[in-house]
Amino acid sequence: MRRGPNPRLRRERLELPDGDFLDLDWNANTSGPIVLILHGLEGSSRSHYARALLAVTHARGWRGALLHFRGCSGEPNRLARGYHSGDTADLAHVVEVLRTRQHSAQIAVVGFSLGGNVLLKWLGESGERAPIDAAVAVSVPFALGECADRLAHGFSRIYQWELMHRMRRSVAHKRERIAMPLAITDLSRLRTFREFDEHVTAPLHGFRGATHYYDVSSCRQYLSGISHPTLIVHALDDPFMTPATAPTAEEVSRSTTLELHRSGGHVGFVSGRWPWQARYWLDQRIPAFLAPHFGAA
């Protein structure tokens, strides 16, 4: 499938119990099953994978909604805290809101990268209580500490440099608006993910440090608790992690389909003989997995 222009999106703001807010970008459909999309680190509805899935869901007649994590919709969130890989409360709140509004609607959640970690952790924590019909997780950092260390070496440092630049800039802009309880003053000193999580993520979200954050937030330890039909798609050549980061078939639940591919990169899985006629395999695989779980819809 070749990716075309994205249909116009409609933004909805959801108020959170703590006084903060989340922004959802919906495709143009107003009926049909709901596919809630979770973006990756510093992502948004402008991310290539998000735009593609919103377009695919629209073409299928499904309602697609991209959930922006706090501060990722283009407007800083109201509180000093932000989002992180292990924060499942916001996802749970949004799904509950959607389920309350649309009691009989079929709901699926698709998470990419960081969003995939949030999704799988929430599914494992919730078990049968999760009020959804199916889920898909792509290019997930199953073991956060190992992924942080991998990104500090070799070619992967290019990805780290770009993401760290955006993360430092986001914190700096937010500091101009509200007071943030951070001991570090010179953000330029933060060069690696582990340093950023030690000095920013951990203190803002109640962790003792980066290692504590990684230990309790990594989704790999929750995979056996997943009760709903779930597809995990992962490439062993993902530059964000090593092949050993991926779980084994014995670690996932019976309701989980684990697809490990030799190639595909990070949220890539591109094929085709010519760059101008690329085929994005995820645009086919994700809806193919979800469709049977949406039944007659």
Image (cartoon, rainbow, N blue to C red):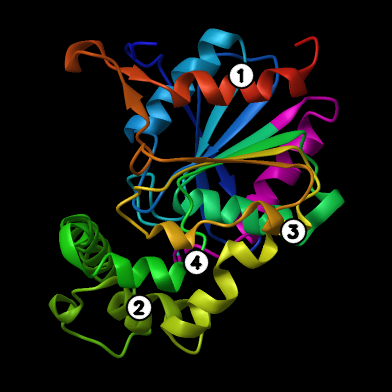
Q: Residues within 10 Å of mark 2 (few under 14, many from 20)?
A: many
CA distance separating discs 2 and 1 = 39 Å
What element does badge 1 sit on? helix
Residue depicted at x 59% and y 76%: 216
Residue highlighted by disc 1 = 288
Residue highlighted by disc 3 = 224
CA distance separating discs 3 and 2 = 31 Å
Which label belongs to residue 143? 4
Residue depicted at x 46% and y 55%: 70
Mark with earlier residue (3, 2): 2
Residue 177 x, y percent position in the rendering: 29, 67
Identify which residue, 103 or 279, lies in the foreground. 279
What element does badge 3 sit on? helix
User: Are circles 4 and 1 on residues that touch, CB within 8 Å?
Assistant: no
Residue 127 x, y percent position in the rendering: 81, 54
- Nearest-to-viewer mark from 2 and 4: 4
What type is the residue that disc 2 sits on?
Val
Residue highlighted by disc 2 = 200
Q: Residues within 10 Å of mark 4 (few under 14, many from 20)?
A: many
Q: Quadrant of the C terminus?
A: top right
Mark with earlier residue (4, 1): 4
Identify which residue, 95 or 281, lies in the foreground. 281
Q: Is residue 205 inside the magenta stretch?
A: no
What type is the residue that disc 4 sits on?
Ala
Residue depicted at x 35% and y 44%: 266
Q: Is residue 83 inside the magenta stretch?
A: yes
Span shown in magenta: 79-107
> Residue 30 vs residue 265: left or right?
right
